[in-house]
Amino acid sequence: MLVVFRTRGVDWDRFAATLRTHEEDLSRSGCSRVEAFRNRNHPAEWIMLQHWPDKATFDQFAADIGPHLDLEAGVDWTDVSTWETSALPEDG
C-alpha cells in the first residue's frame, strides 16, 4: 500500500535529517520504502511517499511513533491519502 503525504514546509534540512535518522524505525514499523521530494518550482511544497504492507500496519505506526516523528521533523501534513493498487509491478 502506498501512503502519500503533502505539506508546505519551512525547514527541508530538518525534515530530511529526521527521515535519515529514523529510517530504521520506519523499517522496523513495517515501512519498506520512503521517498520525499520538494516541488521544483515551489520548494516549500513537499511530498512524501511511503510503502506499507497494509493499512492496519500503517495505522499502528500512525498511532504510535508517527506523530513524534512529525514533531521532530517540523511538519504538519495537509493531506494524507492511501493507495492500494499499482498498474505496474514494484520491481519494474
Image (cartoon, rainbow, N blue to C red):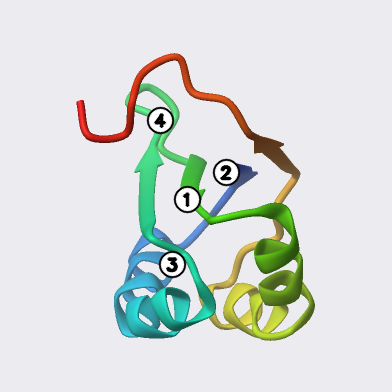
Residue 28 x, y percent position in the rendering: 44, 83
Nearest to viewer (mark 4 / mark 2): 2
Nearest to viewer (mark 2 / mark 3): 2
Hey, what amino acid is under mark 3? Phe
The residue labelled by disc 2 is 1
**Disc 4 to disc 2, C-alpha distance:** 23 Å
Q: Secondary structure at mark 1?
A: strand
- Are circles 1 and 2 on residues that touch, CB within 8 Å? yes
Hey, what amino acid is under mark 2? Met
Q: Secondary structure at mark 4?
A: loop
Q: Is 17 on the left-hand or right-hand side of 72?
A: left
The residue labelled by disc 4 is 39
The residue labelled by disc 1 is 51
**Disc 2 to disc 3, C-alpha distance:** 23 Å
Residue 7, placed above or below residue 39? below
The residue labelled by disc 3 is 15
Q: Is 39 on the left-hand or right-hand side of 71?
A: left
